[in-house]
Image (cartoon, helix red, strand yellow):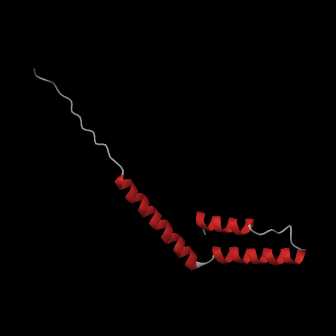
Amino acid sequence: MRLSSITLAVLAALAASTPVLAQEPTQAADSQSLVNSVKLGIANSPALSSEIHELEALMFEANGTYGEMLPTVDLRGSVGREHI
């Protein structure tokens, strides 16, 4: 399963927000199992996966709309003899 950047950001934030070294060993093990459980739940959640895909589709559509608003340049040219 491919993890999107939003899911990876959430997982990184969860991993970074757990101060394991300052806790006692049993608390550290409990918090690690909680963090692992949350990571598994996020990674395997069909509802979250659906929402992420919907968000990515909306972002893709917004980028397309933005591209349509940008200015365009059209060039035309011809080659031939000039009669004076």
On the picture, is 31 further left or further right than 43? right
Look at 88% across and 78% down and name the residue there: 26
Which residue sits furthest right? 25
Instruction: Name the residue at 56% across, 74% down.
Output: 49
Along the horizontal axis of the image, is 21 left or right of 68? right
Quadrant of residue 12 in the image?
A: bottom right
Looking at this view, is 61 or 71 the one in front? 71
- In the shown orientation, is residue 25 left or right of residue 59? right
Q: Residue furthest front?
A: 22
Residue 10 occupies quadrant: bottom right
Image position, residue 27 (x, y; %): 85, 77
The answer to whether 35 appears left or right of 4 in the picture is right
| Residue 70 point in image, percent of width and height | 36, 50
Which residue is found at the position 41% from the left and 63% from the top?
A: 61
Number of callouts: 0
Asked if 61 appears above or below 34 in the picture, the reply is: above
Residue 22 location (% of width, % of height): 86, 68
Quarter that holds the C terminus: top left
Residue 31, position in %: x, y? 79, 76
**Quarter of the rendering containing residue 24:** bottom right
